[in-house]
Amino acid sequence: MSDVPTGRAGTAYLVRPGKSGDDAKSTGPGVLLLSSWWGLTPGLKAYGERLADHGFVVLAPDLLGGCRPETSAEAELELGELDPNEAAALVLSSVVALRSQTTDPSAPIAVVGFSMGASWALWLATRQPDSVQRAVCYYGTQHINFSDLCACVLGHFADDDELVTNADLVAMETELFEQGHEPEIWHYPDCGHFFAESDRAETFDPEAADLAWLRTIEFLQRP
């Protein structure tokens, strides 16, 4: 595991499956891991390490350029100052960097995103349909034309979410279904936004997070 340069100022967190020797570089299929507005936190890195334990090469770009907001107000401010064009360029360049580290650089990757990162995951899967085979979205939506999307989509959503309304989710599901896609959407009762992020003690729900994790791993490992 290491910090590696990205396509813009900052770094990304790269973690591989277990090594077979001191200098060996283990490879596997790639997973791009995109953070929520809390940035590249220890919890997100730990999630990437768990993915690597299941045989994936994982790259998590620092979407906030080193910022680590502590409150929602700070996170909103950072998000408001984020240049969407720079963020898009970082996401796209991260795909190239990740694929170069995998067993087969020509093979498509999977992308897992949390909240803001989930929106970017769906954008990426639609923007580069040949590059993304599976997209996992934790409590994040996107409202774009999904006609170019080829990836299978898995979504985890809280039933008590102040940031993603039921109308938001229904609208996205409708758009996906109308354009020929069949997303796999799971609802988690008695949970709020960020329920799967261990750094957010006030909203983290270990039971729901574990269930979402098991569903994610099963989804990513499908043939």
Image (cartoon, rainbow, N blue to C red):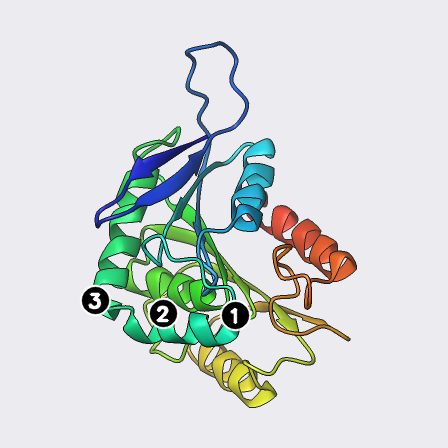
Q: Is residue 107 left or right of residue 197?
A: left
- Residue at the location (22% across, 47% down)? 7
Closer to the chain start, of discs 3 and 2, is 2
Q: Residues within 10 Å of mark 2 (few under 14, many from 20)?
A: some
Image position, residue 154 (x, y; %): 56, 62
Question: Label 1 sits on what residue type?
Answer: Thr
Instruction: Identify the residue at horizontal 62%, vertical 72% (top origin).
Output: 157
Residue 187 image offset from top left, x and y in percent: 69, 72
Secondary structure under the numbered disc 2 in the rendered image: helix
Q: Which mark is residue 78?
A: 2
- Report the residue marked by disc 3: 85
Residue at the (69%, 79%) spot, across then down: 159
Q: Is residue 7 rendered to the left or right of residue 63?
A: left
Between the residue at mark 3 and the residue at mark 2, the CA separation in whole angstroms equals 15 Å
User: Mark 1 or mark 3, which has the lower sequence index?
Assistant: 1
Mark 1 vs mark 3: in front: 1
Identify the disc placed on residue 117.
none
Dot 1 crowding, Cα within 10 Å, few <14, some 14–19, many 20+: few
In space, the residues marked 1 and 2 are separated at their CA atoms by 11 Å
Amino acid at the residue labelled 3: Asn
Sequence-wise first label, 1 or 2: 1
Identify the image quadrant of the C terminus.
Answer: top right
Look at the picture and state if 195 lies above or below 111. Answer: below
Q: Looking at the image, which residue is at 69% across and 67% down?
A: 202
